[in-house]
Image (cartoon, grey):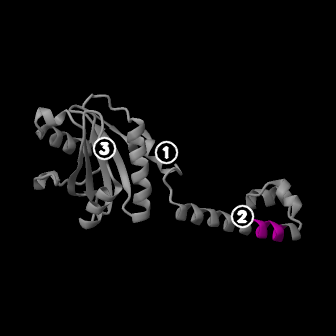
């Protein structure tokens, strides 16, 4: 469900405070009964970080909402967003991300890399304050997770690593032929001294 925004609300996002100021207004517009349920929104941004749209993806229960990557990214792609921010509320007021919150974020992050529509933050809000995955460092940590990396991407990464290793071996062999000190070869190639001695 598209969230109606006034032109003055289509601001340029500089930091998580900007996101919260908009999302808090949207949450407070809901009646009390709906506010006591988890909402999950996506905020689509243009290249200049200006808000293009805010879409309510899921309205759940008091403790969870169901989010499917297809729904998230179909809106992003249809509406030509180049960056996404995820947002949801915790009616309980406890802003710490749950295991499910981290899992959904991780899954959406991996999808965003494949579709080249990066997720740049996920904020959890209450009526008065918020938690930012980016500000806390959690988004960066999740981006390094391999849990939802596709088999295709894992194979691509494996082949890149093999290629890097082969280049390092060739470099080490060439330097060894020139009788360069083994410590310098190790520092230059990234190989261990034991590996170089075997060449």
Dot 3: few (<14), some (14–19), or many (≥20) neighbours within 10 Å? some
Where's the C terminus, which quadrant?
Answer: bottom right
Element assignment for label 1: helix
**Who is closer to the viewer here, 170 or 81?**
81
Which numbered disc, 2 or 1, marks the residue that appears first in the sequence?
Answer: 1
In the image, residue 56 lies at what x, y percent? 21, 50
What's the magenta region?
168-175
Which numbered disc, 2 or 3, marks the residue that appears first in the sequence?
Answer: 3
Instruction: Please name the residue that numbered disc 1 is placed on.
Output: 141
Dot 1: few (<14), some (14–19), or many (≥20) neighbours within 10 Å? few
Dot 2: few (<14), some (14–19), or many (≥20) neighbours within 10 Å? some
Q: Residue at the spot x=38%, y=36% of the render?
A: 97
Classified by dominant secondary structure, the portion drawn in magenta counts as helix
In the image, residue 103 lies at what x, y percent? 42, 44
> Marks 2 and 3, how far apart in space?
40 Å
> Marks 3 and 1, how far apart in space?
18 Å
Element assignment for label 2: helix
Instruction: Please name the residue that numbered disc 2 is placed on.
Output: 165
Where is residue 126, by image quadrant? top left
């Amino acid at each position: 469900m598209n969230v109606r925004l006034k032109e003055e609300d289509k601001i340029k996002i500089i930091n998580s405070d900007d996101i919260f100021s908009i999302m808090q207004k949207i949450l407070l517009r809901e009646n009390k009964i709906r506010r006591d349920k988890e909402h999950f929104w996506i905020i689509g941004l243009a290249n200049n970080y200006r808000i293009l749209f805010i879409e309510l993806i899921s309205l759940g229960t008091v403790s969870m909402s169901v989010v499917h990557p297809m729904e998230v990214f179909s809106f992003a792609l249809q509406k030509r967003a180049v960056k996404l921010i995820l947002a949801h509320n915790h009616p309980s007021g406890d802003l710490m991300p749950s295991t499910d919150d981290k899992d959904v974020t991780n899954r959406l992050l991996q999808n965003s890399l494949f579709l080249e529509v990066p997720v740049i933050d996920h904020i959890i809000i209450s009526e008065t304050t918020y938690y930012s995955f980016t500000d806390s460092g959690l988004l960066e940590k999740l981006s390094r997770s391999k849990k939802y990396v596709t088999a295709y991407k894992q194979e691509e990464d494996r082949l890149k690593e093999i290629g890097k290793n082969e280049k390092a071996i060739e470099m080490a062999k060439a330097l060894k032929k020139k009788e360069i000190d083994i410590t310098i070869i190790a520092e230059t190639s990234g190989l261990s001294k034991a590996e170089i001695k075997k060449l």
